[in-house]
Amino acid sequence: MKYFMIILVLIVVALAALFIIKDNDLLLVGAIITIIAGFWIAVFQIPKESDS
Amino acid sequence: MSFLNKLLDGHEGGLKHEGMTPMQKIAMRFVVIGLLYYGLAALEGMIMRMYEIKPLPFIDESHFFSIMTVHPMVGIFGSSYMIVFGAFLFLTPFLMKKPIYSIKMANQSWMFIGGGTLIMWLAGFLFSYAPLYTLYWPLPADTEQFTAIGGIVYIVGVVGIMIGTFLYTYNVFKTIVYTPPGWEKQPAGELLKSALGITGLMNFFRKKDTEHLVPLPIAAIARGTIDVGLNAIVISTAGVLILIYLVANGLFSADMQGTWVDALLYKNIFWWGLDLVADGLVLVFVAGTWYLLAMMISGKDLYMQNVARAALFLEMVVSWTVWSHHLMSDQGQSNTLKVLSGEVVTAFELVTQGIAVFIVLTTLYKAKPIKMTNELKFLLGGILGFMLAVPAGIIQADLGMNRVLHNTQWIIGNHVHVAILVGLTMTLYSAIYVLFPILTNGVKLYSQKLANAHFWLHLVGGIGMGAFMGMAGIDGMLRRTIYYNGEYNTYMILAGLCGAMMLLAFVLFLYNIIMSIGLKGLLGIYQPSPMDTHECIAEAKDK
């Protein structure tokens, strides 16, 4: 579930970022790095989840 | 045996679906729906090809553009995603020699993606929703030309596709790392590191190499699946964003002026996500599939395995930084991004793709003599497709050439359609021909002549259609434009004939497959399997 929760948070974060960032290059790169890093973390949660 | 009997029961007894495992059925379910959506996309394509020669009286302009809006989505998500996901959900447990993590989740994946595609298609068919660039064009979502309800239905469909995609992503990674009941504890973290290429990367800095825990095709599947997931986050975000505008502005007439998202920023993020699939994924998944096919066809290990792994990692870096070639005509886009990401990184795709082509061809060459089977023919066709389409892409990703080629038929013709129809689709056909006997417990192909006809019609039709569209583009024909006076009719008639060849190729292929497995077998794929096993293939076939 953690994986899907992190994805959900990432979508909300990305959505909020689109409304907030406007045309700042640095924040754009920051947003992309956050999405990559966030998804990476989400994928690394997968092995830790119990096998049910 | 009469024609009717053969149609119902299949060639030499056809497909005995009772003997199929749940995994075989799941893979076939994905592939069959994927092929049907391919047929739908091909039909839509032919309608548009005819319309470009002479507008058809029974289709008005708004409907023409709604067909154009859903056509790429049906082709990419309804067809390519479905076939690729079906094959990889089968191959991941098959190659890892362990059961899939969740059969239920795999079934939900095809239902969500198949159903989502249908809902999205209905938005075009019922509501003539046709903003063309819905998901990759600056906001605001247009509620003046198109109904808000059409847009909402469209986005709901897209969200369905993305949910199916997330489930697929989770299932693939979980299958790689989990410990099946009764098994010795699997090193989950190390397996994931190996699958993502971190082990391979660390080996560059270690004196003693750590062993790779997953086979090379699994590494390719895992790397590509990362990009699929990231793209799904971006598309879901864009979808929710559009939904907010459609509901607030379209249904409740709320004033969203002060909240408008920066158009260039949105376009950057969207193209970044889309190119994870359009550039990165196609090359990563395709290279991985080529490697697997080359090994299966030749029966030998891959030539230069280590370089292949390194190239896959490099391709991921390329796919994350390549998007700016889509924004070369945007004046607001920074020149640094245009040159570095748009030109330099894009040109690097020639290197990564070139390495993949070299490795595959050398593996095949070293195994000679090898028989020219259907899978080998289609594999070579797929390689040819990318060898044509990738350089076409590099040509248009040049700031000078882009001034001439931007938004013309060149882009969509000899780059996009040759890449997808000749490169990707022929690779997928090769995979289908390889997997067909494995998934159907050895059903024989009904006709080799039909398979040959399928190959040549598809190859010549695909390259021809792309080439004639490209020629029209060089002469100035824009994409997404109707020419009422037949200004480009020489090219459009030739492209139409080539398109018809491809449609015929698909009909012959479908006929061949249905006659091989029989209608009863085909319908049986969608019935629950009587076998209670997570294994890919039943050990005793007569069970």
Image (cartoon, helix red, strand yellow):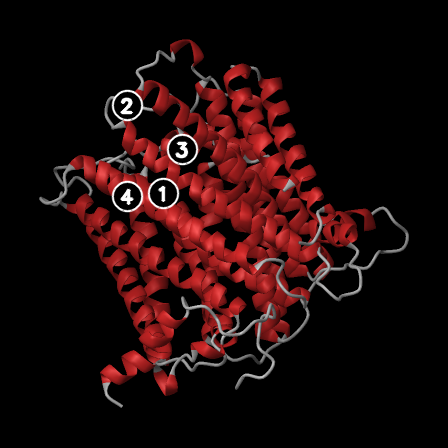
| Amino acid type, mark 1 | Ile
Q: Residue at 27% x, 61% y: name it.
A: B503
Q: Secondary structure at mark 4?
A: helix
Q: CA distance from mark 3 to mark 1?
A: 17 Å
- Residue drawn at (71%, 55%), measured in percent from left and top? B177
Discs 4/3, front = 4
**Which residue in the protein does label 2 denote?**
B143
* Circle on res. B135: 3
- The tag earlier along the polypeptide, 4 or 3, is 4
Q: Earlier in the sequence, mark 4 or mark 2?
A: 4
Q: Is residue B450 left or right of residue A5?
A: left
Q: Which residue in the protein does label 1 denote?
A: B412
- Disc 2 packing (10 Å; few <14; some 14–19; many ≥20): some
Q: Are marks 3 and 2 on the same chain?
A: yes
Please report contact status of discs 4 and 3: CB closer than 8 Å, yes or no.
Answer: no
Residue at disc 3, secondary structure: helix
Residue B19 position within the rendered picture, expressed as x and y whole percent measured from the top left: 49, 79
Mark 4 belongs to chain: B
| Residue B4 drawn at (x, y percent) | 23, 82
Helix, strand or loop for disc 1: helix
Give a yes or no on whether discs 4 and 2 share a subunit: yes
Tell me the distance, in whole angstroms, between the alpha carbons under discs 1 and 2.
27 Å
What amino acid is found at the position of numbered circle 3 in the picture? Leu
